[in-house]
Image (cartoon, coloured by chain):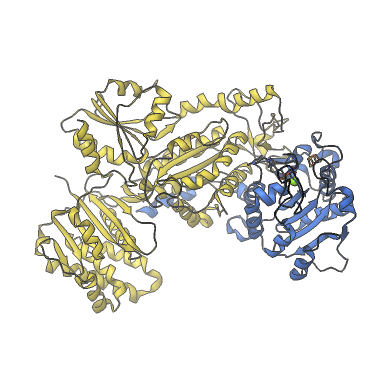
Chain colours: A yellow, B blue
Amino acid sequence: MFLDYTLRIGGEAGQGLQTIGGALAKIFSRTGYHVFTHQDYMSMVRGGHNFYQIRFSDQKVSAYRDMVDILLALDLNTIEIHKKSVRDDGFVLYDSETIKKKFEGPEFIDVPFKKIALDVGKSSIMANTVATGAVLGLFDLGLERLKEILKSAFKKKGAEIIEKNIACAKAGYDYVLSNCPRCEAVEIREPEEKKLMLIDGIQAIGMGALMSGCKFYSAYPMTPSTGILNYLASKAEEFGLVVEQAEDEISAINMAIGASFAGVRAMTGSSGGGFALMVEGLSLAGITETPIVIAEIQRPGPATGLPTRTEQADLLFILYAGHGEFPKVVFEPGTPEQAFYLTNRAFELAEKYQIPVFIQSDQYLGDTEWTFENFDVEHLIYNDYRLREKDLEGVEEYKRYKYSDTGISLLAVPGESGKHLVVADSDEHDEEGHIIEDAETRIKMVRKRLLKKMPLIKKEIEAPLLYGDPSPEIVLVGHGSTYGVMKEVVDILSKDRKIAMMHFSQIYPLSERDRFDYIELLEKAKLAISIENNAMGQFAKLIRAETGFEFTHQILKYDGRPFTIENLKEEVDAYL
Amino acid sequence: MPTSEDYKGQVPAWCPGCGNFQILSTIKQALVELGIEPWEVLLVSGIGQSGKLPHYMKCHTFNGLHGRTLPVATAAKLANHPLHVIAVAGDGDCYGEGGNHFLHAIRKNPNITLFVHDNQIYGLTKGQASPTTARGTHTKIQPYGVPSEPLNPLAMAISLDCSFVARGFAGNQEHLKELMKAAITHKGFSLLDILQPCVTFNKVNTFKWYRDRVYKLEEEYDPYNRVKAFERSLEWGDKIPNGIFYKNDKETLEEMVPTIRKEPLVRQKFSIEAVKHEIEKFY
Ligand SMILES: Cc1ncc(C[n+]2csc(CCOP(=O)(O)OP(=O)(O)O)c2C)c(N)n1
Ligand code: SF4
Ligand SMILES: [Mg+2]
């Protein structure tokens, strides 16, 4: 058996769940455990019920479980809601004085968080530090790493506050050590490799953009996409980016287009509702052949829907967004690592083909943190396809939309290209970029920007990933954020079945089938199940429209929550 | 030095007698007199009769969507600020469809110039009411008369503390040229609302109608007095003042963004070496 613990921290918004959870997740990843964290929060700043869950293991973990080993309850509600999810040999850490209720039973460990904070730190604010120390005490993991974290977190507040927090952490730690005889049974091995990186999907997209030479990001805040705006804004001054909070999403996408036209790599991002406002702008990028990258981080709709929860229901909307016909590419990463590399690839394709490219994701992947040994920057691509100064020296007459075999015309930077003029138009236009209406030019332009580019773009798309049995009888098919949970379910079921996962992270256009005929593989399988976080089976519809393959079995979840290992396995089992 | 010929573009497809012709030739003259070369100018337009203007000129052009000139122009300026960025828009385009962008571009104060071809009507779509059409005007859609109050772009801009606010008239080309030059050279967001007769669809606000009413703000008028400027911007009817109503020399958006203080964004080379250590922050 490998080590696999789940810790759930529950409480109200504003109680500091993120601080405790964030610190513990970092401690585990720095110790070398593989970590997977997941947040479940309501759309409120105070009150309600939220939880932060950390799964840590000495093996790779990529999904979350329903059942928990340790519940850290900051309020009574947490115990009432989550008690049933605690394993028989699990623990509930709480402070009976704070929640004004005492629980009997071997799993309950009553730690006076608040009283210790007052006694040792002279302030009840430090109760969370006591609680964090108490969790570590349960595993007897030592306090060194927590000390590091406290030192950097309270650097600005001075040495005294740091000392008090450290003392509080130690008091919480010691209290559990000496008051929990059952905890001695908790066996925990220190892992071999040391220090893993801990990153969530949103940060991976942000860092991917930064490391792809994105120079301009404009957006209007909208959960769950706001993290990209936060990340890039925090790097703007140091690395030379301009990050603009636009007055609305219409402005955000038009700004990204304006910046890109003016010569820099540009990106915008939103969630479904905000992206709905961007749709005319998307079409503008299409006809003006302006490269842009758009992050669409989905949450459940329609309209405001469930702002802080997850769903994969914008897939067909994104695919068909924009009036008129123009090429686009849609990526939907399954892990933060894929999010990082696909964001890079999105910029490469956007710039190379002068098209809009999407990074489609959702609240679930956006907010879940995963551990990795490293992201290798050597694998990043950066080609500057824009022409400046010397690049245009030999060019006699520059035409922004000059016809070519590939459909790609030279992209010059206005003002940086000598006397050459760059003219772009949202009206149908001629090679120079001036407005036209004649049928002949129209046909040529449609061929240039759409029909010639599309086959070349399709060649760039990679085949889906097959994980598990190479000639499976059962195939779980999914896209984007269901990667982790499908993978773990395949791991469990592969012990006695020929089963595999087929995961699509490059979802539009679909890859060519000459290198890997994934449809043939599905046809040969006894059972192919499409798994999606939506009610209509949108990806299955796409596969059918593009390839004719029809799924006979689907597992769809549309309660605004991600699949857990237990519930996906149960649903798959029902088909076996 | 550039000449008017350098700026010559396609033959305009406007109605004969349209006020846009004067605006077009005056922009060219203003740029020529300022010694600005075509490759130093980016004209951003939307959709409407004014939106076509860049095609009748020769310079860098982004003819985008109806109403969306200002976001494109603002971002282009942030990315490539050595360019003179001039947005040309219609009254429907800028005060209606793009009204929100108008408010916020003024607040952001990028160093760009906005010329609004204000013909108090929707020209391209054949004569519907625009945000500046007078209340009570009869149109096909409002046969009982336009029910809304007209929007006063100057008063609105002054109330938002816009860096430069002026009004000109297409029929007074000499004065218009001076206003255009002042707007282009002003550092900060410059609004120049241009009274532009639409000879086909606006039978009320004709050349004669404007000529009978417009007059220049007095020599001694002080454009730095905001309250006075607001008061004068409310004058409309028998007498319509033209000139520079208001100025406030304040920091521009580009000056507020530290990233581009030293070098334009477009010239800052990307190197993976400089950023790759960011990964370490996640350990
Ligand atoms: C999103 C969108 N809505 C509507 C239109 C149709 N349309 C084009 S121009 C215009 C109004 C033009 O009026 P104005 O902006 O005053 O320009 P003018 O033609 O008078 O110069 C309209 C409604 C459009 N092109 N795009
Ligand atoms: S419709 Fe009016 S604004 Fe348009 S070109 Fe004709 S006269 Fe000018
Ligand atoms: Mg008009």
Determine the residue located farthest toward the front in the rendered image: B144
Residue B213 figure quarter:
bottom right
Q: Position of residue B280 (x, y in %)?
A: 38, 52
Q: Residue at x 43, y 25 (%)?
A: A546
Determine whether A365 is above or below B158 in the image.
above
Question: Measured from the top left, where is residue A206 in percent x and y?
Answer: 45, 49
**The N terminus of chain B lies in quadrant:** top right
State whether residue A391 is above or below residue B269.
above
A474 w.r.t. B80: above or below: above
Quarter of image, res A354: top right
Q: Is residue B163 left or right of residue A294?
A: right
Q: Is residue A266 visible?
A: no
Horizontal relation, residue A384 to residue A302: left or right: right
Whether residue A244 is visible here, answered yes or no, is yes
In the picture provided, is A417 more to the left or to the right than A162? right
Please state the horizontal and vertical placement of residue A294, each as a whole percent of the image. Answer: 50, 42
Is A55 positioned to the left or the right of B247 in the image?
left
**Mark count:** 0
* Camera-side residue of B206 and B20: B206
Q: Position of residue A368 (x, y in %)?
A: 34, 49
| Front residue of this view, candidates A132 and A439 | A439
